[in-house]
Image: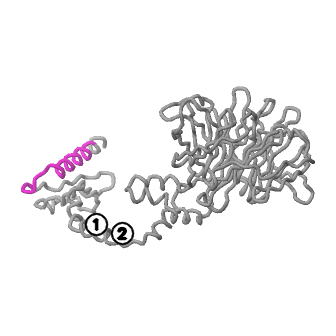
Amino acid sequence: MGEVAALRQLVGEVQELWDLYGANSHPLPRWYLLDFEHGSIKDDHCRARTGYNSELLKIMEANQSPPRKRSRRDKNREKAPNSNSTEEMQQEIWSEFPGDLFETVVARLPVAAIFRFRTVCRNWYSMLGSESFSQQYSEVPQRLPWFYTITHENASNNVAMYDPSLKKWHHPSVPLAPAKIIIPVASAGGLVCLLDLSHRNFYICNPLTQSLKEIPRRSVQAWSRVAVGMVMNGGTSNEGYKVMWLGNDGNYEVYDSMKNMWSCPGTFPPSFKLPLALNFRSQPVAVGSMLYFMCAEPEGVLSYDVSTGIWRQFVIPLPLHLTDHTLAEFQGRVMLVGLLCKNAATCVCIWELQKMTLLWKEVDRMPNIWCLEFYGKHMKMTCLGNSGLLMLSLKAKRMNRLVTYNLLNKEWQKVPDCMLPCSRKKQWIACGTAFGPCPSALA
């Protein structure tokens, strides 16, 4: 039976060669093979089986040529006459497409797709910076925030941005002199506030468009560490924003982008104990026009309303066995994220501030199977984002983990390693902040 199979394969190959290179003027007889096992005749060209009489074997279609396969070129030629009319019809449709509807559609595309549109033509590029598109984009339901981070090798200002929706790292260039080392300290409305190591020079940038603006130096020239917060005046950056810094000595100033100047709206309340012992590892969080700062002594929170200039202090005891911790915000509520370390066990927990009792109530914690990896290790935690979606950098000796936590659906996810393009070297995240991606935000 092996010979029959080999013969069948040979006939099939000959038939295929004839289909490809045979001439129309020389028809090839149809081949038939005997199937001794099933008592049927097998047509090797059309792969069909028909019953037969063992006494009569006739080739009925000896003078008929086999059907030829149509090539792709022939199929394309059949479609060619209609292609021009289709293109003309599309041009007529798109030429009459309403501009405002077009902006509505583009505003709802993924951020990465919107930036690919910029390369199509000048009109589309200028559209992203228009006020009408900015208004359309602001009406779209809020997207997941991105994360603007500085890698550990920051001698040349290596920047990495993480898109959680695509779980992808982007590596843009920063339009600053290589000698300047700046760190992200706050964000609002798609803009990120950057501060240099002297803690005196501030910059505002849109990480997506790489636009950058250096704002005037603060009037206090002495080197001192400061906590920085940022709020929007309205719904978009076109209505302006405010940046505020606060030092342990009680000095503070507020920058108004509409006036392009720093000012001190009032005096620090004398009832507040100085120095403040601010927790600089915790970025201030914004709820409307209110900024919240975390203090270490006494344990609690300071709040400042940039619209009214009113200060408030809340003494709130921290949970037991809490080490690294930072403030967060979710839908107008003040949250707390921290490491609980007891004996050799370590776990990340989430708390919500109860307004009536001014106590922290635990609402979630990292899955136990993840926490087992930290057992017996001296862990350090840094929170890179504090609004809606958190990115936590968990470090120990020879270990660095990045995870995100969605405050809405209480979902924990691991973040892929950050590596430079065309390189397999893993980048260590030094610091960062979350920002809402907005192509039309102006610094």
Callout 1 environment at 10 Å: few (<14), some (14 to 19), or many (20+)? few
- Mark carried by residue 280: none
**Residue 15: in magenta span:** yes
Residue 159 lies left or right of residue 42; in this view the side is right
Query: What amino acid type is highlighted by mark number 2?
Result: Trp
How far across and how far down the image is residue 168, in percent? 55, 45
The residue most toward the left is: 25
N-terminal-most mark, 2 or 1: 1
Image height of 173 relative to 304, above or below: above
The region drawn magenta spans: 6-26
Residue underneath mark 1:
87
The answer to whether residue 376 is magenta is no
Q: Residue at x 87, y 57 (%)?
A: 354
Measuring from the top left, give residue 329's x and y in whole percent: 75, 53
* Local SS, label 1: helix
Q: Residue at x 85, y 36 (%)?
A: 341
Q: Can residue 283 be seen? A: yes
Measure how far apart labels 2 and 1 are at the Cα level: 11 Å
Question: Quick one: 81 or 330, which is closer to the camera?
Answer: 330
Label tally: 2
